[in-house]
Image (cartoon, grey):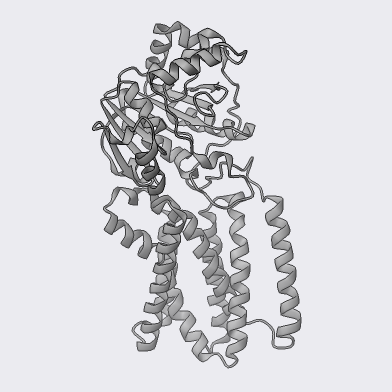
Amino acid sequence: MGLLNLDETHIATASAYLAETKFARPQDIPFIDQYRLPYQIKTNPENVLIIGAGAGNDAAGAVRGGARSVDAVEIDPVVVKLGQLYHPDQPYQKDRVNIFVTDGREFMERTDKKYDLIVMGLADSHTLSSSLTNLRLDHYLYTQESITRARELLKPDGVLVLSFEVTRPWIGNRLYKTVDQVFGYQPLAFEVRSDGAFGWGGYFFIAAKQAEVMTNILAAKPELANFVTKNSRPFSLLTNPLTDDWPYLYLDKPRLPLIHVLMAGFLIGSMMLVKKYLFKKSGVDMPMFLWGAAFLLFEFQNISKASLLFGLTWQTNMVVITAALAMILAANYTAYKKLITLRAAFIGLILSLAVQFFIPLHFLNRLSPAVKLILGGGGLNLPFFFGGIIFADWFAKAKDKSRAFASNLLGSAVGGLLEMISFLTGIKFLLAITLGFYSLGWFIAGRRKVII
């Protein structure tokens, strides 16, 4: 996070520095301030939305660019506080700047305000993430569904400016294809660097809601058009766009990352040894094993999906895990009181899983926080309630409870490892695997005729 003093004095000093170096030609200097550039494209905008406002550099650029109203959205309250305390331009103290400490995707879903300019700022995580991580810190901001919502929020002559630190070709290809798919034409794509004078720079992907608006802007500003042309970067459309179902921005293509495969192989080998030496002749209780695999696989994919609703990793974990535990507690009470039959619980389990195939999850962001918490936390975890009822009954009837519990734990480990399949298939397909595990476990238990 950098706090840049970008007032007129600094701009003059930085421009003089750049003029003395070979980094930039004099005619390029007016356009390599990444925070000023959006307002040279869309001059004096009335309403501006900044997604990923950070400590205030983008907001300071909006104020200097003549924006009359700026909605600055930043998910991290600590970063906002630092900006309020230490940013030399004090953009967050300006009356025209409205600060929203929330997830950018959530804000876009809930607002109906129309904007002349939407700026998707450069996030710190761009240089920190890779295909080796399963954290989706900001992936959902760059999916087709997210860019579509941003386009909906633009006025007829509005412009989207998306900046990104493209460290791998496929990252740029995917962003380029996603914007192209949503706007219906190829966006401007060019690189902006200032040798650190105006920040670290990045790649810009720019599209207007109506293609002719962008054409007219460049025609009226030949110097800007020359800069864009000179610094344009080729990106391929021969790739798949990002979606909420497959949001893996830092993965070059649908595949299993090698490190995940190696770790899974090691853990599965370890579990086979555990099975050989600890279970011995008793064998694995397959219904309990499959129930455990379904449980943790469903829990992991829930956390992945819930990031779309609650943003911050710790917040998502808190909501999802708390809701899951609440559902399990309710299931134990229901099983103890025998309020519903196992068959009814299984039907409820199947239906509560099946309905999640058809609900566009991001629509929940348009609801009030309380309703979203109930539906996003409780609704997503409802299968745990029905599955917990069946598990409690099976466990109570098990003759060898240690074997049943161990089988369930072993299955959970396998289910957790299978979450990486979403790198290949997308997140939603994990629901089909979960449904298969639950159904197979129920079928095997039914064949035994003693626990159903």
Please tell me how many numbered marks the rendered image carries: 0
In the rendered view, does 367 fall on the left or right side of 140?
left
The residue shown at (54%, 29%) is 200
The residue shown at (62%, 43%) is 251
The residue shown at (43%, 11%) is 218
| Residue situated in front as seen by the camera: 5 or 177 | 5
Q: Quadrant of residue 230?
A: top right
Looking at the image, residue 211 lies above or below residue 407: above
Horizontal and vertical percent position of residue 178: 50, 33
Q: Residue 452: tell me if it is visible.
A: no
Horizontal and vertical percent position of residue 384: 44, 71
Horizontal and vertical percent position of residue 185: 47, 22
In the rendered view, does 225 fall on the left or right side of 75?
right
| Residue situated in front as seen by the camera: 198 or 220 | 198
Task: Identify the residue at the far left of this view.
Answer: 95
Looking at the image, residue 202 lies above or below residue 365: above
The residue shown at (63%, 46%) is 131
Horizontal and vertical percent position of residue 247: 52, 45
Looking at the image, residue 173 lies above or below residue 284: above
Looking at the image, residue 169 lies above or below residue 433: above
Q: Residue 85: tell me if it is visible.
A: yes
Task: Identify the residue at the far bottom of this view.
Answer: 399
